[in-house]
Image: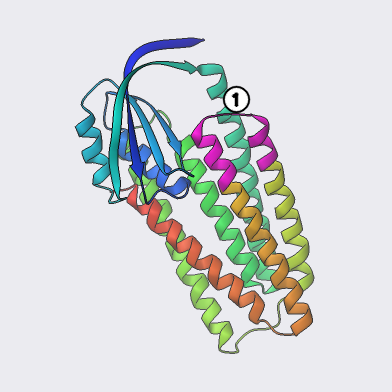
Amino acid sequence: MQTKSDLIKATFIINKMDCPAEENILRMKLEDIASIRRLEFDIPERTLYVWHTGDTEEILTSIDELDLDSALTHTQKVSDTVNEKDQRVQRKILWTVLAINFGFFVVEIVAGIIAASMGLVGDSLDMLADAIVYGLSLLAVGKAVSRKKQVAGLSGYFQLLLAVVGFAEVIRRFLGFAELPVFEAMIIVSVFALIGNGISLFLINRAKSAEAHMQASAIFTSNDIVVNLGVMVAGILVHFTGTRYPDLVIGAILFVVVARGAFRILKLSK
């Protein structure tokens, strides 16, 4: 089924939009504006397209409140087409990706604790952050804006707490209060996480969607693959150096990434 309507297409440059976290911040911020019919994000180009029937200045004002260094570039009248079947396919894929991310969060955090690896624990929290981002987009559909903001706030504070506790543990281990991590577990679990993210990326790319939020999901998952490789390299370095420091370095980096994501999610609750 397809629906068509005459709309105004407004193009915004969002200079500080560099990952799906900002996309979700913008989506939830603009949900209160009833005139908006469709949003499309081009994260690599830091561009937001808004199809609407109302006042463009109202939209620009809401975006400016997020302090993402934004600007309206131009507007034009267009005829918009939305394919509802494609949207259902996209939602199914995103649910699958969410399940993979959350599943590997559980596997990695358990393995990280058992193997005394902060790299695995950090990677697990990065997986959790991904699941939260996807979940906030999917689980909140059809619910009141106030409810969405409550969920975002609780998720953000929980994620920030985990990042702080994790970083404190990295510091404790740097000071010498830790055993050598099990490098075999670091490598093996990271390989499986890499496979999981590879499957996610395959599913997203197979959809061959031109929708920007699907392209953003592909970028997000590609970044996770880089993280998995980083933990694998850290495990190899632990083996060859005989020290815990490579694991602690990658763990510290990942906890900073998780904390940064938590602050972005907390913006959703404002």
Label 1: state its secondary structure: helix
Between 116 and 81, which is closer to the camera in this rendering? 81
User: Which residue lies at the image location 66% right of the left edge and 77% below the top edge?
Assistant: 246
Tell me: residue 34, above or below residue 155.
Answer: above
* Front residue of this view, candidates 69 and 200: 69
Q: Is residue 30 above or below residue 76?
A: below
The answer to whether residue 213 is magenta is yes
Identify which residue is drawn at 60% across, 89% down: 176
Give residue 80's quadrant in the image. top left
Q: Residue at x 58, y 65 (%)?
A: 122
- The residue lying toward the viewer, choosing from 74 and 18, is 74
Residue 154 x/y as whole percent: 39, 52
Q: Where is residue 161 in the image (x, y as percent from the top left)?
A: 44, 65
Q: Give the range drawn in magenta.
A: 201-219
Q: Is residue 259 above or below residue 67?
A: below
Left or right, 183 with respect to 207, comes to right
Residue 61, x across and y down, in percent = 21, 40
